[in-house]
Image: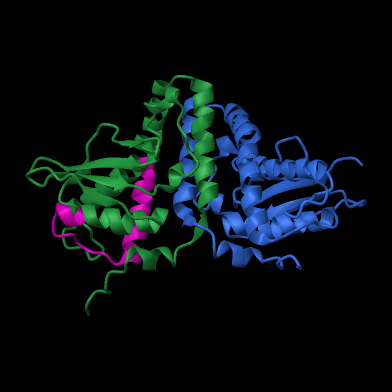
Chain colours: A blue, B green
Amino acid sequence: MAPPAPRTGDAVFANVERVNAELFTLTYGAIVRQLLTDLEEVEEVNKQLDQISIFRGYNIGIRLIDEFLTKSNISRCVDFKETAEVIAKAGFKMFLGVTASVTNWDADGTSCSLVLEDNPLVDFVELPDTCQGLYYCNILSGVIRGALEMTRAWCCMDKFHSAFWCCFKACISPEPNFWCTHQGMCLVRLATHPR
Amino acid sequence: MAPPAPRTGDAVFANVERVNAELFTLTYGAIVRQLLTDLEEVEEVNKQLDQISIFRGYNIGIRLIDEFLTKSNISRCVDFKETAEVIAKAGFKMFLGVTASVTNWDADGTSCSLVLEDNPLVDFVELPDTCQGLYYCNILSGVIRGALEMTRAWCCMDKFHSAFWCCFKACISPEPNFWCTHQGMCLVRLATHPR
């Protein structure tokens, strides 16, 4: 029997449980703001957001990739380019309700940028001058990293598993790579491992 | 011209921007978990969640009440009982996609409990024995408190304003009053001020 056809991000997003975007945005913002009050220095807040991204965002990604694969019917990506497109168009759409664009490819096609111009996480955010270095949306990089690592683990475990979405060693570079400008644009640099 | 008819929580929820509930739940959980790691003691985490609830949840409530009033077309509540029902049925539905039940009224009808049996915030939460005293969902109490305080401020400012939803001095009691059990039930005690 042929596998079910892949579903668009829109179709999947329409059929998952959702909460009010404003509530999510304000809750996340409330916590970042509390961190800024408690820790005072932007650099300290970035460290904390890094921790949350690396240890917690990663775990979120591991869980969300399950939901993504089950509901999207997307199977194996043929190359890194398709992987980036799937994350940008189907992944972001399914969880945040918006899509990212894939740009700034390097010459050998091993790294690109995902640009999230309409980013619900920063809908009401205005960073004052003292917070310009803040990686406000850093949790998202952890989520993507966790999801991709999980698919890589599956690749190693069972190459022909049916619920299988392989990113061909794609991963996020280890540095913090999300930021939000005054305009709320969010950017992540996605790169493959050296082959 | 007659004011527009009030809309149900379902109708409003269907027409607001939303994000995937699992992403919200996991993001909130990730941050609570990071606090537990950093602060170690449940009591310290509760203090931090209280801070977030009082100072940040409150601000969230102030913003969300605007969206609630604009989109629900609900005007003045006739009494505290109706206020509680509107929060439980329309408010929770509009923001979390679920409704709460209103129970445990005291003899003179000045306090009641809102019970959220299907609470998306705790969908994947299992509290270990060491965390039994944790007010996991405490941010919600701040949100409700902020929303109610805002309507009270409007009552004082302009008694006949058209976008006006008065709770007749209803407020949340000042103690932390949300908790989540092993089963994920969430409860808030709502009480009017002495008249």
Residue at (44% x, 50% y) in the render: A23
Looking at the rendered image, the quarter that the C terminus of chain B falls into is: top left
Residue B162, image x, y percentages: 23, 66
Q: Is residue B18 magenta?
A: no
Q: Is residue B72 magenta?
A: yes
Task: Locate residue B64 relative to residue A71 in the image: left or right.
Answer: left
The answer to which of B110 and A12 lies nearer the viewer is A12
Residue at (50% x, 41% y) in the render: B124
Residue at (81% x, 54% y) in the render: A104
Magenta segment range? B57-83
Task: Locate residue B157 relative to residue A105 in the image: left or right.
Answer: left
The answer to which of A33 and B22 lies nearer the viewer is B22
Q: Residue pushed farthest front?
A: A1
Task: Locate residue A158 relative to residue B134 in the image: left or right.
Answer: right
**Is the residue B180 above or below the residue A91 in the image?**
above
Residue B149, image x, y percentages: 25, 46
Residue at (78% x, 39% y) in the render: A173
Picture quarter containing residue B178?
top left
Task: Locate residue A173 relative to residue A14 in the image: left or right.
Answer: right
Tell me if residue A152 can be seen: yes
Residue A42, image x, y percentages: 58, 31
In terms of secondary structure, what is the magenta stretch mainly? helix
Residue A52, image x, y percentages: 59, 33
